[in-house]
Amino acid sequence: MKVVVFWMTFLSPFILKAQLDTVLMRPIEVMGFGLQSYATGDVLRVIHTENRMMTLDASLFSQAGIYMKNYGHQQLATISFRGTSAAHTNVLWHGIPVNAPTLGSTDFSQWNAWLIDDVAIQSGNQGALYGSGSIGGTVFIDHFNKSRVNSASIGFGLGSFGYNFQGGNAQYKNDHFQGATNIYREAIENDFSYPLKGTDLIQTQQNAAALSYGFRQELQHFWKNQRLSMDLLLFYQHRESQPVISQNYAQDFIKTHNIKSVVEHFIDSNKGSISTTIGLISDQMVYNQNPAISFQQMTLTQRYEYDIGHHFHLNSGFLINFFTAKGSNLDNINHQKQFDLFLIAKYKINTRWSSTLGIRESFMIDSGSKLLPSIGVERKRILPKGALVSHAKIAYGFRYPTLNDRFWMPGGNLSLKPEQSVSTDIGFQVRYRKFNMLINFYQTWAQDWILWLPQTGNIWSPENIQKVAISGIEYVTGYQYSLNENVLESQAVFNFQSSVNKSAYPSQSVYGNQLPYVPYFTAVWSNKLHIKMWSISLDQSYTSRRYTTLDQSDNYAAEPFFLLDAAIDYQLKLGKITTQISFKAKNIFHNYYENIQNRAMPGINFQLQLITKL
Amino acid sequence: MTKSKYIFKSISSFILIFITLLFVACTDDPEVNPDSLSSDDSNENTSGPFSSGIFVINEGNFGSDDGSISFIDSEGLVQNSIFFEKNAFRRLGDVVQSMYVNDTTAFILVNNSNKIEVVNIDEMTLLHTISGVSLPRYMIGNGDYGYISEWVSFSDPGRISIIDLVTYEILDTINVGFGAEALAIREGKLYVSNNFENTLSIMSLSTREITQTFSVGPSPAAMIIDKNDDLWVVCSGGYNADFSFANNGSLVRLDSNDEVIQEIALGMNVSSKLITNVDSSVLYFYSGTTVYSYTVGDDSYETFIENTAAISFYGIGVSPDGDIYIGDSKGFQSLGSVYVYDQIGQEKEEFEVGRGPNGFVFTSK
């Protein structure tokens, strides 16, 4: 099956790009499974990251519907969706789960967008399709379903606070072969100044410098109806650990090495398509002079898709995952073994109605098993020059305890159960050629969420103690206006989310209160104006107050913040050489803000980027 | 940049956005939000001198820079974050470990911020900041000098820094064992419990030399001197190879010759805190949410207070009138609580304080 992927219709419900840097609508004839919203009504947004000189968290920061927690500028960054935490977000690279099995989350500051083609984000419970951790949402980093061209480019960046970037990449292809090689170096001193809260003092950030290198090699071979692909990612990062504002003189640092590799075989026949993927991951982290913490993972997953008649489409497969970790507090851990089976059946009832039934059975040695059903239904109504799509879904989700939860010494708890959740969604999309609108209502009920609690003797230990009820609304609207060759694209996204504690822990008085670090309200408004070879972007985002304690104490709250970023790009063409010059200004109003309480973020800052492509 | 400039910039930004972009009408300015300037409006009228009442040391959540001091006055009214309020919103720091009072001066030891804030205790106004300390834990005074225990790091020996109580200058540092923790002074000698090893060090106050170091029990911590002038040290207990509790906590008694003359096995791991009643005849220690009492001279201890509604006891103190104050960290998920019990263990009152209450200082006019 040669899959023709029409990105804008397949990957996004929006006629406009979900984000202004998402890929343009153009057919790409490639072989492989595209990213698809298998559960009816699910929304996939693709963010095109190729030739972006920034960490992945910076690339995703302004995406609506997610909340990125940054422990400082260019510091540890985790992502969360729909009032959940980073551990409730599943991150897949080429379909391989890459959340660190020790912490159960991904540090997006360790991934650089320069080495990545695209990232897709999908809100909502996807447990049946993607397994453990897909409760709040799922992030997809790269996949092999894309076409290369013969090209090469180099990029340079300079910016505030000693920022500098150098990168290069090359793409190559012939009739049976294609590949890409990317390499980069990024450094920043991060010595920005900020007003010390509650005082008239200006403080210069200390100990927040970061240096990273990365390399990527992708190779793909095509023959007949088959494809064999490999991708190798190497990251190294030496990062000073940005201290809280009152201990600006701290000297902690973190060094990380990441090796990720994947091999995928794809075969297409008239009886269906099969992809078989093997992933190997080896990551290591050193904090100060302490012994290294490392983990290894080997994953084998297979996916089989086929059509039965014109009405049934089936997607089935399995996942086998082996992983372990080693460190002074994680000693003698046997390889953890996980085995999942899944089946997703999509039934097209008629031209208007379709439904999806999903089921997944997941087994983890010594951690039990979970059965995860999901069902969704979608109705499409054709309107004059547009369409109205409505959908509803109910899905179960879960998350296994992490290795730290189970084995950390001292405190690890071997008797922990998986966290459980059930979610419902109902939503409507209106699609016109130059206008689109989406509104989605969701609810999640979760129990057995794991919290680390102090025990006797200053030991902390995790327990299945928290119940949570989440409800929210996502609203997205986009508009495109063209005049001659000039195009204005605009998109606004609003999110309201209530994520409340439904357990009487630590006291009855906190029952019903919002969870820490879950903003009630976030909004993003992005605008991009294309005028011939110029483009001008204006992005605004707002994040409401976030409490850091369950009693919603104002004293311990992170205040709301508003950011305005702007960019101007010019594309210069000289023969076959194209040079893109970009000037970006971030936080133009120079607002002081904190993403994590008492961790400073920079005021206005600038970047100049130059990418020359041959 | 001054705050007024920030406010102006913020206001300008909102006006501009509102008019031109019709977008952020519902935004708040974090810099001008009055909620961020007051911890609890209902307590504004209770501010005043802190010369008589109870200081609660709120450790704060590690890495969150939110340690604080609360004050419970003689009327039972609570003022939280008094250091922050009385010092132009200066943050106290990360992991407020302890507070030592010398006459009208208080020394607040901020462990993970590697500093000691010196304040006037009546007004809680900042007099001086002592830097140059490394993971400070506790302080004790004698004459013109203050003695500060410091962990230094998890891989270096701990030390004692000696400061001038008038100039706050660090005069000397003396290495002791790993994890230098609690301090006690008796008959010209400074006792230091080395928490990361199982030892007690004794330093001569006159020569500032370590005269003796010897083993006691696993994880030695707080020390008190009883009515007989014997010194007691609580040993929290150790861990098995798999880091499960070894349940070998103990109370160790040293006579005036520094000889171990009694050791009471507790059969469990206990916290690092130990206090006595007013006349130093009864010792109190706790594990989980149960406080135990030991009467000097007895062979065994008794259960004194059980609070099944509490989450995690984190600090304990005895007031001059004999009431027992206990801090509950609430798992650091919310603000902490302080429970007050009378001398027979009946609960009298409960207060909401800052995050992670780990200790108390009682003052009186």
Image: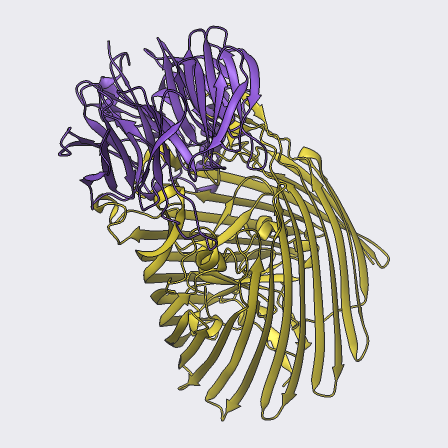
Colour of chain B in the rendered structure image: purple
- State the scheme by which the image is colored: by chain
Quadrant, the C terminus of chain B: top left
In the rendered structure, the answer to whether residue A384 lies left or right of residue A290 reads left
The image shows residue B205 at horizontal and vertical percentages of 48, 13
| Front residue (pair B224, A557) | B224
Tell me which residue sits at (42%, 78%) in the image: A361
| Front residue (pair A220, A281) | A281
The image shows residue A236 at horizontal and vertical percentages of 70, 51
Image label count: 0
The image shows residue A93 at horizontal and vertical percentages of 60, 65
Tell me which residue sits at (77%, 69%) in the image: A179
| Front residue (pair A65, B213) | B213
The image shows residue A49 at horizontal and vertical percentages of 64, 57
Residue A383 appearing in the image: no
Query: Is B103 rendered above or below residue B300?
Result: above
In the rendered structure, the answer to whether residue A251 lies left or right of residue B271 reads right
Query: Is B155 rendered above or below residue A169?
Result: above
Quadrant, the N terminus of chain B: top right
In the rendered structure, the answer to whether residue A238 lies left or right of residue B251 reads right
Please tell me in which quadrant of the rendered image residue A474 appears. Answer: bottom left
| Front residue (pair A33, B288) | B288
Please tell me in which quadrant of the rendered image residue A222 appears. Answer: bottom right
Looking at the image, the residue that sits furthest to the right is A575
Residue A335 appearing in the image: yes
Chain drawn yellow, letter?
A: A
Query: Is B171 rendered above or below residue B243?
Result: above
